[in-house]
Image (cartoon, rainbow, N blue to C red):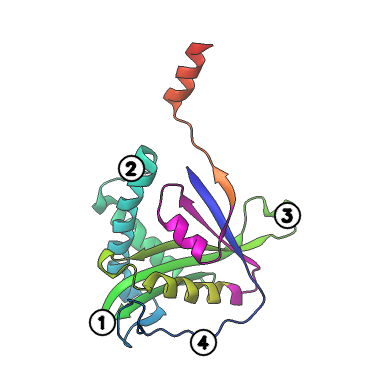
């Protein structure tokens, strides 16, 4: 089961990003964290984070999202992201500290499904958010999301959406970032259909 959640642009400008860690709230103390645009040099690290996140998703979605072998997927994912780097509608940001990539986020702007029938045709989309496990719960994901949202809203869209599995803990993370549930995608297995059919 996947829930689609969205955030509406308030129209207010955001304060400048403070990309350093620090303070007494338990976050990592450092002023060297940098959120920067991803480049082709980051694609290997991008894939490793992407693959790690994809493996985690299989625990939330089960057989439906089971993966093909890693090496079969690697070329496809990296080639696709390399093409996205050429497209002004796609965004790729990395969180880097001491020359190590701690996390990444990707997103894009584009027409929604059946855009021709809706007054609001174009939306922003968060595609991937991945932070290495040892650097989670230190604000890295929040800083990546904030930086991406600023870029998406700067294109003029009024809403940004993201799909997240119902059991994924990230659902609660997005809620804390101002996203609200707007839709629900339900899945039925063929065996469930057959079982119900035999009971009739």
Rate crowding at label 3 as few (under 14), some (14 to 19) or many (20 or more) other CA atoms within 10 Å.
few
Tag 4: Cα neighbours inside 10 Å, few (<14), some, or many (≥20)?
Answer: few
The spot of residue 186 in percent (x, y) is 52, 38
In terms of sequence position, does the residue under pointer 4 or pointer 1 come before the other?
4
Q: Which mark is residue 99?
A: 1
As drawn, the label of residue 118 is 3
Q: Nearer the viewer, mark 4 or mark 1?
A: 4
Front residue of this view, candidates 14 and 149: 14
Q: Are marks 3 and 2 in contact (CB under 8 Å)?
A: no
The mark nearer the N terminus, 3 or 2, is: 2
In the rendered structure, the answer to whether residue 19 lies left or right of residue 153 reads left
Q: Which residue is mark 4?
A: 16
| Left/right of residue 48 with respect to residue 4 in the rendered view | left
Q: CA distance from mark 1 to mark 3?
A: 44 Å
- State whether residue 190 is above or below residue 93: above
Tag 3, which secondary structure? loop
Q: Which residue is mark 2?
A: 66
The boundaries of the magenta stretch are 153-181
């Amino acid at each position: 089961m996947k829930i689609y959640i969205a955030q509406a642009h308030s129209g207010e400008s955001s304060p400048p990003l403070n990309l350093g860690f620090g303070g007494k709230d338990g976050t990592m103390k450092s002023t060297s964290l940098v959120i920067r645009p991803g480049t082709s040099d980051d694609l290997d690290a991008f894939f490793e984070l992407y693959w790690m996140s994809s493996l985690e998703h299989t625990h939330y979605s089960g057989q439906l999202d089971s993966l093909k072998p890693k090496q079969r997927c690697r070329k496809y994912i990296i080639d696709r992201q390399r093409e996205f780097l050429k497209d002004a509608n796609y965004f790729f940001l990395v969180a880097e500290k001491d020359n190590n990539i701690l996390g990444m986020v990707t997103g894009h702007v584009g027409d929604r499904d059946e855009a021709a029938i809706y007054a609001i045709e174009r939306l922003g989309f968060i595609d991937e958010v991945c932070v290495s496990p040892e650097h989670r719960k230190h604000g890295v994901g929040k800083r990546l999301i904030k930086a991406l949202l600023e870029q998406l809203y700067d294109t003029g869209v009024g809403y940004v959406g993201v799909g997240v599995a119902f059991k994924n803990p990230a659902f609660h993370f997005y809620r804390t970032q101002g996203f609200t549930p707007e839709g629900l995608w339900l899945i039925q297995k063929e065996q469930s259909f057959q079982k119900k059919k035999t009971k009739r």
